[in-house]
Amino acid sequence: MSTSIIGAAVGRVDGKLKTTGAARYAIDHPLDNVAYGAGVFSTIANGKIVRIDTAEAEKMPGVIDILHHGNADQLYRPAGQFEHSRASEARPPFEDDGVYYYGQFIAVVVANTLEQAQDAATRVKVTYAEEKPLVHLEDAPAPTGEPVANYSRGDAEAAFESAPIKIDETYITPVETHNPMEMHGTIAAWDGDKVTLYETTQGVVNHQQVMSEVLGLPLENVRVISPFCGSGFGGKLFPWPHSMVAALAARRVKRPVKVYVPRSMMFTTVGHRPYTKQRMRLGATADGKLVSIQHDVLSTTSKVDTYVEHCTSSTPMLYTCPNVKAVQHLVPLNVGTPTPMRGPGTVPGIFPLESAMDELAIRLNMDPLELRLRNYAEKDESLNLPFSGKHLREAYQIGAERFGWSKRNPKVASMRDGGLVLGWGMSTATWHAGRGGATVRVRLNADGTARASSATQDIGTGTYTVIAQVVSDKTGIPLNKIEVVLGDSSLPPGPTSGGSTATASVMPAVAGATNSVVNTLISIAQRTQGSPFYVKETQGGDPPSLKMTKGFIHAADKAPESGVPFHEILAMRRLSGIDGEAKTGPSEEMHKFSGHSFGSHFCEVTWDPGIARLRVSRWVTVMDAGRIINRKTATNQILGGVVMGIGMALLEETLYDPRNGKPLNNNYGDYLVSTNADVPAMECIFVEYPDLNLNEYGARGVGEIGLAGVASAITMAVYHATGVRVRKLPVRIEDLLGHV
Ligand code: MOS
């Protein structure tokens, strides 16, 4: 069916644009007469604005206007139907005089230059009626509301009570802040009652919908343009206040207005992964069969929206177990609204489950991989459905062999390399396999090029390239003659880049649109005088079966080169080009299955007890993620996930001042993410079983799964090296001092 371009390690088709600086990011768009908006952000976390004194700021050079709740046009609330229109915060900016978190947009100063706007913003004087904020989950009373997740099968409590072996531990994952290199930003430009937003977003279609609702405009009056995105990691899934502020300000000053979110406010007003506190109880038999899993989760949200970090999502399906209970409650804090961050729910949720599995293995004196194999789930017991494809056993086996797992001596601190103590850890990874709707248009041009377009976007993951690969696969047109146009809401509607679903969603529509335009071309070839495939309509009989390969239209039973280059057929008909379009939806077939990808991580840490230095020194990841469309970009996604996981395990934590909710480490210097120095040579292997229930290529997404299980593999390795079990991330050197 497919040529070798599917699966090849193809470089990004947009790589040159990015490396030469030609790629245009949101606020790079050059517009005439643009004005600059600088935010004024709250410096308390809870209370009311009593007075905003703008007198001094207004007199500053270049200042055009200052908008705040007392004078700005009211925005509507987004309708908030998930997947059709979702904003990150239900409360639009400037709605009232309330302050709900530190770093909330409370005013915007619009000026002729960025410097003038920023300078004047510092002169806006705000008087607050401050109330004591609630900033930490640990300071909050126990939640009394309804649980936001409540799963149960069997009788987990009774099975736990009677289990011969019990693990009962509590694990904590901290607030982590998305730190994409490209900060959030918007340029809003009005033309009458139509607005164009140059955005950095993971979903131009959703952004358009939300902004039309918030501004009270017909959908077609809002256009969202986002051709490139300097990463999002979930932080750019849904619109944030600054986008609405830019639109409001531009409408008022009758000029395009550019608003970006400074790095420090990237920690307040554009989301984060929330804090979680998770009690995990495992009950097992003496030979290591799980008889009970109980997962109790507290996670945080804000006072202006309800965000659920679905930590229990993988718990009921990852292992076979007759009795499972998973319950989650929310705790609202005076902190900005959390939002999905790469691998939301599963990534923090699998940390306690996989950690507890290791603690159980130690109690049983059993190899942790063997424990996982003993509890291998052959089907999804939560849905009572077969998996659409699960080759985790193979992923464990290949990873173990590649890593040399059989040489592991389980005794703590028993493995050494010179003066370094080695620790080995492993973990299971999983992420759901989903597919949504997409519409794609593909055009074949008389100049021998092709063009594919859709209102989806490439957030750095390789979507431009994957789409070009599918068009090339179906036509044989080389990649350098295929233009892919994305990131514009005026194109046929495509999917949000989220949940590792964009590739699986968009590919069927690209294939369908390409097939459609090729079929049209074939029928033109058969109906055009002068074409070697011309069939007189009156003649009757079956025309020869034609197909398109290597860019030629040719008889199906003959070599491609025996036929005619496709653009010559268009020329015979004096056509500049022809279009095909396809609209595809979720896979109907998938209703009969539980769709998940799986994988294994194997890692080594080195611990230097003399100088208390901990490093990750080796990594092998094996992924069962369906068919891989592009080995290079897929490997990049998986290993990128591992790199973020190393950050989660060892470095990342947003710390808030309890007095005013200010993030203390709100910059690249103090908020640590993994750098090259923290990351060893890593290996990523794919076990490739196409998931044909999901789409004709059998491709699943790979954006999130790489991060799942990384932190628990590392804390397991840290235990193996030091004898210290860290249950509160990130691992800190002070946790390990005084041991070994
Ligand atoms: Mo992903 S957290 O859906 O960008």
Image (cartoon, rainbow, N blue to C red):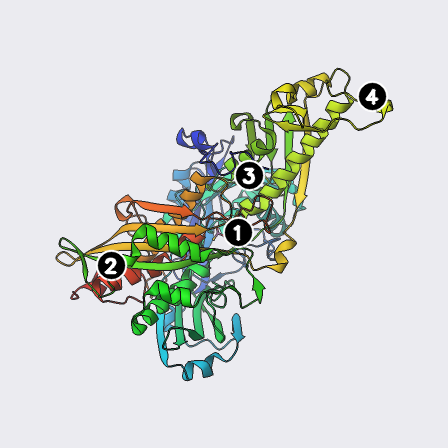
Q: Which mark is in front, 3 or 1?
A: 3
- At a point 50% along the width and 75% down the height, the residue shown is 322
Q: Secondary structure at mark 3?
A: loop
Q: Which mark is residue 219?
A: none
Which picture quadrant has residue 192?
A: top right
Q: Mark 3 is on which residue type?
A: Gly
Say above or below: 632 vs 555: below
- The answer to whether the residue labelled 3 contacts the one labelled 2, judged by CB atoms less than 8 Å apart, is no
Q: Dot 4 surroundings within 10 Å: few (below 14), some, or many (20 or more)?
A: few
Q: Dot 3 surroundings within 10 Å: few (below 14), some, or many (20 or more)?
A: many
The residue where tag 2 is placed is 423
406 and 162: which is toward the camera? 406
Q: Which mark is in front, 2 or 4?
A: 4
- At a point 65% along the width and 37% down the height, the residue shown is 513
The residue where tag 4 is placed is 536
Say above or below: 531 vs 271: above
* Mark sitting earlier along the chain (1/2): 1
The residue where tag 1 is placed is 238
Left or right: 586 in relation to 362: right
Disc 3 residue lies near ligand 1 with CB under 8 A: no
